[in-house]
Image (spheres, rainbow, N blue to C red):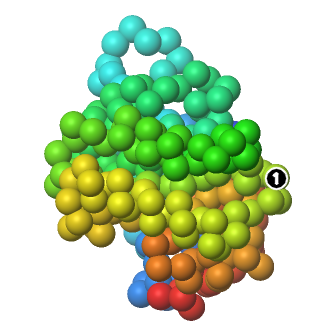
Amino acid sequence: MCGNWKMYKTPGEARALAREVANGLRGADDGPEVAVCPPFPSIPAVREILEGTSVAWGAQNCSPHLEGAYTGEVAVPMLVDLGCRFVILGHSERRQIFGETDSSVHEKLQTVLGAGLTPIVCVGETLDEREAGRTEEVVDRQIRGAFEGIPGAEVGRTVVAYEPVWAIGTGRTATPEQAEAVHRRIRATLSGLHGEDVATATRILYGGSVKPGNAGELFSQPNIDGGLIGGASLSARDFLAIVGAECSTE
Ligand code: 13P
């Protein structure tokens, strides 16, 4: 289970939220793996609180380059130094607002894997694409664009997040059946690329308006391995309730 805090939470606010999340999970070490991804400047504050707890932390983006004259960018070795375990890649907000493409996601994926961190690769169709019956084609292209040419052993330790763009921040969730159908398809595509063992090992999260009230039925689907949570992860109470919903479906 991963919280994507997007561009919310100053370092001070992030510290408080991380503390609430960690306190809420204290003693629940046999539950699902939990991580939060704050904005870059809030990562050190979150680390201060979460070090030594069961909650991991990560970043929302990175440069494909290890260092260099790239003003405004953040390199993966910097994230390693900050104790990050995860990096979200290719979120639809980055694709739509900042022009990221399948090939930039692929490059970043190689860099993140090379550093030993766990990428969370986001894919998902827009409303227009769904209505035109193109969901599978779009998601296939995004999965192939990211994972083609990456060694199977590496792919098996990645995380994919299916986030239909029309469900992000809209309050309109995919039905469990809609989400499960795409998750099943993603696993089949991964299986075609890298074999069934790799496809089975790859965790596939669902993201898009997950709330305490709908989390349980989403996570009970066979191919939904957890969630990537936006808005609801900004409230410790909601986020903890969603983690609890996953516990009860395990
Ligand atoms: P919401 O949970 O706010 O819909 O956002 C989902 C998301 O984009 C997570 O990465």
**Residue 41 against residue 50 in the figure, above or below:** above
Q: Residues within 10 Å of mark 1 (few under 14, many from 20)?
A: few
Residue 246, position as x, y percentages in the image: 56, 81
Residue 155, position as x, y percentages in the image: 26, 52
Q: Residue at x 73, y 76 (%)?
A: 214
Extreme residue toward the top, this view: 69
* Direction from residue 51 to residue 171 in the image, left or right: right
Residue 21, position as x, y percentages in the image: 62, 70
What residue type is disc 1 on? Thr
Residue pointed to by mark 1: 170
Residue 115, position as x, y percentages in the image: 25, 41
Q: Nearer the viewer, residue 186 or 11?
A: 186
Q: Residue at x 27, y 39 (%)?
A: 148
Extreme residue toward the bottom, this view: 248
Extreme residue toward the front, this view: 133
**Is ligand 1 less than 8 Å from the beta carbon at label 1?**
yes
**Tag 1, which secondary structure?**
loop
